[in-house]
Image (spheres, helix red, strand yellow):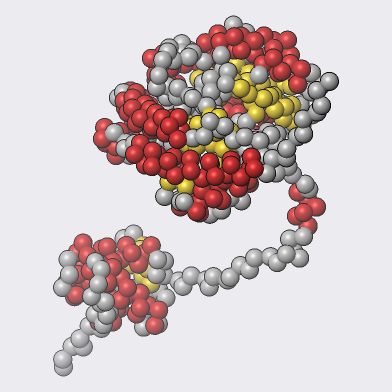
Amino acid sequence: MASASPAPSADIFALDIVKQARLSGSGPLYAQLADGIAEIIASGRLPYGAAMPRVRDLANGLHVSIVTAAHAYRVLGERGLVAARPGVGTFVARPLPAVTELRAPDSAQLAWQSAFIGSKPTTNLSRIYQLPPACAQARFSFFSVHSYGGQMLPLSRRILRRVALDAEVARLRPTDTQGLPELRSAVAAHLAEEGIEVGAERVLITNSYEEALLLTLLAFCKDSDAIAIEDPSQFCTVDIARLRSVRLVGVPMDDKGMRTDLLESLSARESVRVIVTSPRAHNPTGVELSEHRRRELYAVARRLNCLIFECDSFAPLMYRGRRQAPILSEDPDGRVIYGRPVSRGLLMNLGIAIATGQVLEQLVQAKDIVDRGSDVFLQLILRRLLDSGCIARQDAQMRREWGDQLSALLASLDRTMPRSVRWTHPRGGGCVWVTMPERCSADVLLARALEKDISFIPGRAFGVTERHERSFRLAIGNLSPSQIIEAVNVLSGVVKEHVSEAQRLRPRIPMGKVS
């Protein structure tokens, strides 16, 4: 009597079914195979729990490589269609629950939010959001200062690739909130090369230099307090203060920086806790605080018994003459909190804050509450970049490129702009502040400039007060020197036409009789 033949195993049946998978003929073979098997599973021919062929059997049965078969299973696993059980095999996974569409609440359902949030002051950033979308697409865009300079150095790119594979990453552990000790030491050494002598124990690693200001306001200000700040100022700096709900005391500026002669009188009626200043390459005007006013500002801070937050957003981008030292370098009382990006030549937004004593302790405690410390992996990359000298070389490259761009911008303005228009002449940074005569409007000018494919940011977006209607900022952006020259030639024609119209509309004042 003949013995019965053994029953074929379940995975053989599955293999016979999988052999029927249709390949699309486009894309990698493993992706085609995964799509074909996914179609079979979706049809129900391979039900939930069915055993899939082993990788080797799948490869032999379909005449593909084992690598192709393994990649196909990996793709199916990522889609949630199959699940591997170690030591047992691969099986068709339970179907995922159907995704229910989440409908957004309608306006009636969201009505409660208005009463909950209440009225908030208009932010300067919202003014930028309200500008025409064409500003971002303009061919000649003076809209913003790009966040990094030129091409990243080849050595920097190699370091970024290597760090992810480095054994040191596997040993990383959460660090203290103040930052990796070895990174703080590298930052202190980097600052020493710029002439800023601080110990590593005074360095706080932040996620951006703007975060340093936010931590300052969280740690030292109450809602009833005020801060004194240059008017105009960088819009994110102004908006951080408004977000914290502290009052703003706008201090006017001239070509020597903040009007410190007005600072104390403007602050007399307010409980000013912090004076915020950008004494080097101020954004948006580009001006520097004079030596006399630096001393006067510090004396006022002593009399008011308040902190000085020194924002150094364009350090160390100085192109002509002697580089001015920060106020931090002359701070016997530990009154200055110094915030800056590590470098504008990075594709990462880490910053640093320098403080001392109990002020530093309060900042670290505030950061511990906010985010428990900056990203450790990014800190490791930054330390490598500092140790290799990449940051210093990147800064030198930026000084050459940005210096050429700023020189081209200033030379073009000097050559083409009408005499009734004034502008700043910065030695560093990346922007120039332009002011037109009375009755002119930067918003009207922008609308006409956009017709010529030129964009910029009107001055109201940087204002603490409403006194900058006829001013605007020209930032070097990503324009080459030749593009800057071409754009300013066109822009100057638009400005001349606008100024002429405003002057024609100016009312004439009759001369009184001479006695």
Residue placed most toward the observer, 111 or 82: 111
Asked whether residue 389 appears in the rendered view, the answer is yes
Please determine whether, in this image, residue 441 is positioned above or below residue 260.
below
Q: Based on the displayed image, in which of its 4 quarters is residue 256 positioned?
A: top right
Q: Count every numbered label the image shows and give the total.
A: 0
Whole-percent x and y of residue 52?
A: 31, 72
Whole-percent x and y of residue 46?
A: 36, 79
Residue occupying image coordinates x 41% and y 66%: 80
Looking at the image, residue 299 sits to the left or right of residue 256; the answer is: right
Residue placed most toward the observer, 178 or 484: 484
Kindly give the residue lying farthest to the top in the view shown.
Answer: 332
Residue occupying image coordinates x 16% and y 91%: 2
Whole-percent x and y of residue 288?
A: 53, 20
Residue placed most toward the observer, 407 or 156: 407
Please determine whether, in this image, residue 42 is positioned above or below residue 488.
below
Q: Based on the displayed image, in which of its 4 quarters is residue 290 positioned?
A: top right
